[in-house]
Amino acid sequence: MTAIAPPVAGAHRTRARTDRRRQGWVRRAPLLPALVFTIIVTQLPFLVTLYYSLESWSLVRPGSQHFVGFGNYADVFKDSQFRTTALNTVIMTVGSVLIAMVLGVLLALLLDRKFLGRGVVRTLLITPFLVMPVGAALLWKTTMFDPTFGIVNFILRPFGIGHFDWLSSLPLGSVMIEMIWQWTPFMMLLVLAGLQSQPKDILEAASCDGARPFAIFRELTLPHLRRYIELGVVLGAIYVVNDFDAVYMMTQGGPGISSANLPFYIYQRAFLGFQVGQAAAMGVVVVVATIIVATFALRLIFTSFSGTEQAA
Amino acid sequence: MSADSMTAQPGPATAEPAYAGPRARRRNNSLTWGIVGWVVGILFFFPVLWMVLTSFKTEAQAYTNTPTLIFSPTLSQYKTVFSSGLWPYVANSAFATIVSTILVLALATPCAFALSLRPVKKTRDVLFFFISTKMLPVVAAIIPIYIAARDLHMLDNIFTLVILYTAMNLPIAVWMMRSFFLEVPGELLEAAEMDGAPLRRTVVEVILPLVAPGLAATALICCIFSWNEFFFAVNLTATRAATVPVFLVGFISSEGLYFAQLAAAATVATLPVVLAGWVAQRQLVRGLSFGAIK
């Protein structure tokens, strides 16, 4: 073929190249709608946020919009309320996710054993996760945490804590209890999936060799569960760090800002204070912080699950 | 104890006892774990149970220092909830949930296909991109979304929520559908190609039926998230397009905080998702873990 004439071969090659390029586009075509849609709806707003963050703009004063550069950022870092809410967000996320994970591991170990009605118990245990977050928060605020009529104080009354006002005395803790209640089931299901993927013969061999249950757990089960636990922590953090519903419904961030997290605080600034520029700057700061944390987090998931990626 | 005495039997004592003992102990253990399991299960379920119980009480029964356990159930709270204009909110929620889920599946299925069975070159990067959109805080996007919706006269419009819910669920659906596609044996596609069947037909007639259960699971997860979503709904809707979570909040502020009434409203709002979630327990994890856990 090459012997006939070089130009033909060249033409052939370009045709092959365009063919390959077309093939590439044929392959890519199915994913483009989803990709383009996601970029427009999720990425474009962030770019606009970036732009707004350089402006001073109050929603209630038309025409107040003007360029101020990095002034908003300076304000954000000077704002002690922003620092408090940032700290609250960290406490809330780390605390809730870790406690939910510990409880989740314990519950998963429990559900990994055979007992009568195990399926029903599992169904009961996952229910908190399914309750509409707004409803769950209201429920805890009223029927559980009410100082006079709440169940929590009723149970604690014999211990001398009859009239503790949970939401005003321990606002952050109360919100965290509610979130732990909602997120433990998720952690449990994740860890349970890990436990059930553990090869049983190794465990039996260890047990036949006379290894004690706790030693088996520490030496064999826990290392196996590690990636599931990591995944649970990362995913739980993604959802909990953005939580708005529980704070909004239970405490409105109060008293003061003692239980406000960043989503709630930024919401307040934008929709109650109408300070678009400042709220946007806060948003950008949060995004940058999230990107830094997420880069590590994503790497963690991907390295620990790359095994299954390749296997699949 | 009786099991231990069995181990003392003479003959096969050296080989067998190791079995007889643990088995009986295991049975005993299983009873203990059963009790622990049920206690913990009921403990976690209790707030939900209490919500349902309270919803059948009168307000007087709901407001007692010592919780009322025995009472004659009343449906009056539910009557109040249903007569306070709940249905338009349910209709909005149902519309936003169903339409956004259909859109998500229509966008995610081909996308997941191009990331699994017929993978494009940068599959990993694309997957990364999708998951990273879930990491960015929604609150940082709400201001431009609000202003764009206002300028496009799309505030309090149910289609605004449809678009946002589609974007919210799309990454999860792509990852989840991809994990289902990866379970389809690749040879199937090759065999069909060898037979000269056009790709479109192979996908529709061979592959889609295989991933149909996965499609259903993905749909269910998307429905759960859309139904429960509150942040966008409360910020972008007012009266015409408000959804059930917004109703729940508005109900409390208009009717005052009455436990029994609130419990009834919350039960109604929560019920569809709880039922759906019970059915899709396993798939729930798959969806939330972006398909990492099968």
Image (cartoon, rainbow, N blue to C red):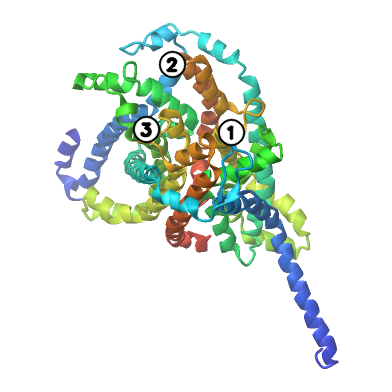
Graded by Cα atoms within 10 Å as few (under 14), some (14 to 19) or many (20 or more), the crowding at tag 3 reads few
Residue closest to the eye, B178 or B14: B178
| Residue named by callout 3 | A256
For the residues carrying marks 1 and 3, which lies nearer the camera in this image? 3
Which of A148 and A110 lies nearest the eye of the viewer? A148
Same chain for marks 3 and 2? no
- State whether residue A112 is above or below residue A297: above
Residue B41, position as x, y percentages in the image: 36, 30
Report, in whole angstroms, how far the alpha carbon at label 1 lies from the one at label 3: 25 Å
Q: How many numbered discs, if any?
A: 3
Residue at image coords 69%, 37%: B154
Q: Which mark is residue B233?
A: 1
Give, as a three-letter code, the residue at label 1. Answer: Ala
SS class of the residue under badge 3? loop
Q: Mark 2 — residue? A: B259
Residue B24 in view in this figure: yes
In the drawing, does residue B54 fall left or right of residue B8? Answer: right
Q: Earlier in the sequence, mark 2 or mark 1?
A: 1
Q: CA distance from mark 3 to mark 2?
A: 25 Å
